[in-house]
Image (cartoon, rainbow, N blue to C red):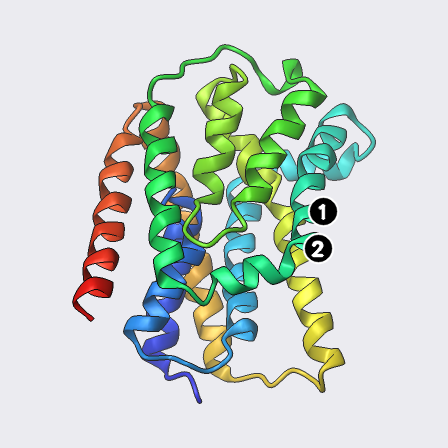
């Protein structure tokens, strides 16, 4: 099935906004593809839009990334690596389980309920720690939340920020760490999918994939800026109401369908 331009724009917009707003990009992509009746293999397109959101992270946090490039062998780099280990291990060992969940809209709705609970609780935390004070055990805990968030419907940004706040991190510092540790994970996941598809006989590209990636990058950057402001104002509960409403609609459609 060929992806049309308007479908690529819509799905790219969904990916860009929901990757960084704590409402689960993977869950919304699954629901969006179901609503658009897209039954074809979307792995290649998903890689493109994830790379698009990766560009948004680079632009938004270029100061931090440039500092790491200048001094790669520092404590912050070690914290990032520790935070990425759980997602890498869980992604490899539980790949079949996560893949099966991507085929279940009901499972996505259940995960959205959990996302809402985490977001609702996030407003109750107001830590004081900076990234310089973060311990490696705390980075590992945040990494465990990131690994669990491979589950479609469980927000990666929402889960990792909740984990960082649970460790007593400042709200903006929690967001910085959450977004930066997404970089190796997204790159690793994209590389793995590219390898799997190349081994299976090659990658078929369409121009609409590039269109979707561009839209995801632009909307992703806007979402990061919006999210940082809302996080500092302790307005995460509004996202809770949204994901619970989406989950309710999905449950209702399953019952009526």
How far apart are the alpha carbons under marks 2 and 1? Answer: 5 Å
Residue at horizontal 66%, vertical 48%?
Answer: 90
Residue 234 location (% of width, % of height)? 31, 23
- Mark 2 vs 1: CB contact within 8 A: yes
Q: Farthest top residue?
A: 128
Q: Is residue 68 left or right of residue 229?
A: right
Q: Residue 34 or 60: which is nearer the viewer?
A: 34
State which quarter of the image contains the N terminus.
bottom left
Mark 1: secondary structure:
helix
- Report which residue position mark 2 lands on: 92
Residue 22 location (% of width, % of height)? 38, 42
Report the number of discs. 2
Question: Image height check: is 135 above or below 113?
Answer: above
The circle on residue 89 is: 1
The circle on residue 135 is: none
Q: Residue 125 or 111: which is nearer the viewer?
A: 111
Residue at horizontal 39%, vertical 74%?
Answer: 8
Residue 128 location (% of width, % of height)? 50, 10
């Amino acid at each position: 099935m060929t992806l049309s331009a308007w479908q690529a724009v819509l799905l790219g917009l969904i990916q860009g906004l929901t990757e960084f707003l704590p409402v689960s990009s993977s869950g919304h992509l699954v629901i969006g593809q179901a609503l658009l009746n897209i039954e074809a293999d979307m792995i290649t397109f998903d890689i493109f839009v994830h790379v698009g959101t990766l560009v948004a992270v680079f632009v938004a946090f270029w100061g931090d990334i440039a500092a790491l490039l200048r001094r790669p062998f520092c404590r912050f780099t070690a914290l990032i690596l520790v935070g990425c280990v759980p997602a890498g291990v869980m992604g490899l060992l539980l790949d079949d389980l996560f893949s099966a969940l991507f085929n279940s809209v009901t499972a996505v709705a259940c995960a959205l309920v959990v996302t809402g609970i985490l977001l609702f609780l996030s407003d109750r935390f107001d830590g004081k720690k900076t990234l310089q004070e973060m311990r490696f055990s705390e980075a590992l805990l945040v990494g465990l939340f990131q690994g669990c968030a491979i589950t479609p419907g469980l927000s990666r940004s929402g889960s990792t920020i909740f984990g960082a706040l649970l460790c007593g991190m400042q709200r903006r510092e929690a967001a910085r760490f959450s977004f930066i540790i997404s970089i190796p994970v997204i790159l690793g996941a994209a590389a793995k999918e590219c390898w799997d598809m190349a081994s299976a006989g090659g990658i078929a590209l369409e121009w609409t994939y590039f269109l979707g990636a561009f839209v995801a990058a632009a909307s992703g950057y806007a979402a990061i800026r919006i999210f940082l402001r809302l996080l500092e104002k302790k307005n995460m509960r509004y996202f809770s109401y949204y994901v619970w409403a989406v989950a309710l609609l999905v449950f209702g459609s399953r019952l009526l369908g």
